[in-house]
Image: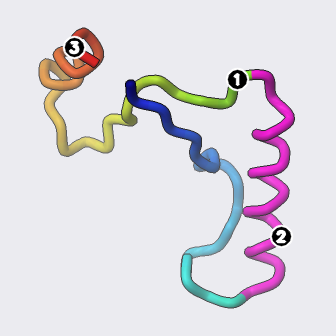
Amino acid sequence: TFNLVEIPDEVEIGNEPLAFDPEQMRAAFDAGHALAQQPDPWSSEPPNVGDIPAWAMDAIKVNY
């Protein structure tokens, strides 16, 4: 079974994921906290980041 929770792209968390920036960390924390309040924040299929052809994504969805 595949499960994924991710911070939505529209959440502004900055461009440097390893920066020790309190505002960036607060935005990421708040987004995660909001997701945790949802009854089922999990996605059961991987996101298509453009590297995987659509036919392969369909096969993944069917088989996993």
Residue 28: x and y in percent read 73, 62
Magenta segment, principal secondary structure? helix
Q: Which residues are magenta?
A: 21-39
Residue at 21 percent across and 14 percent down: it is 63
Disc 1 vs disc 3: Cβ atoms closer than 8 Å? Answer: no
Q: Mark 1 = which residue?
A: 40
Q: Which residue is mark 3?
A: 63
* Residue behind mark 2: 26
Side of 32 where 26 appears, left or right: right
Taking 61 as reference, is 7 above or below it?
A: below
Q: Residue at x 39, y 35 (%)?
A: 47
Q: Amino acid at mark 1?
A: Asp
The x and y percentages for residue 33 are 83, 49
Residue visible at 70% across and 62% down in the picture: 12
- Kindly check if marks 1 and 2 are in contact, taking CB atoms under 8 A apart as contact: no
Name the residue: 17% across, 37% down: 52
Q: Tell me the quarter of the picture where residue 46 sits.
A: top left
SS category of the residue bearing label 2: helix
The reply to whether the magenta stretch includes residue 34 is yes
Q: Earlier in the sequence, mark 2 or mark 3?
A: 2
User: Distance of mark 2 from mark 3, alpha carbons?
Assistant: 38 Å
Location of residue 40 with respect to 6 vertically, above or below: above
Determine the secondary structure under disc 3: helix
- Which label's residue is closer to the chain start, 1 or 2? 2
The kind of residue tagged 3 is Asn
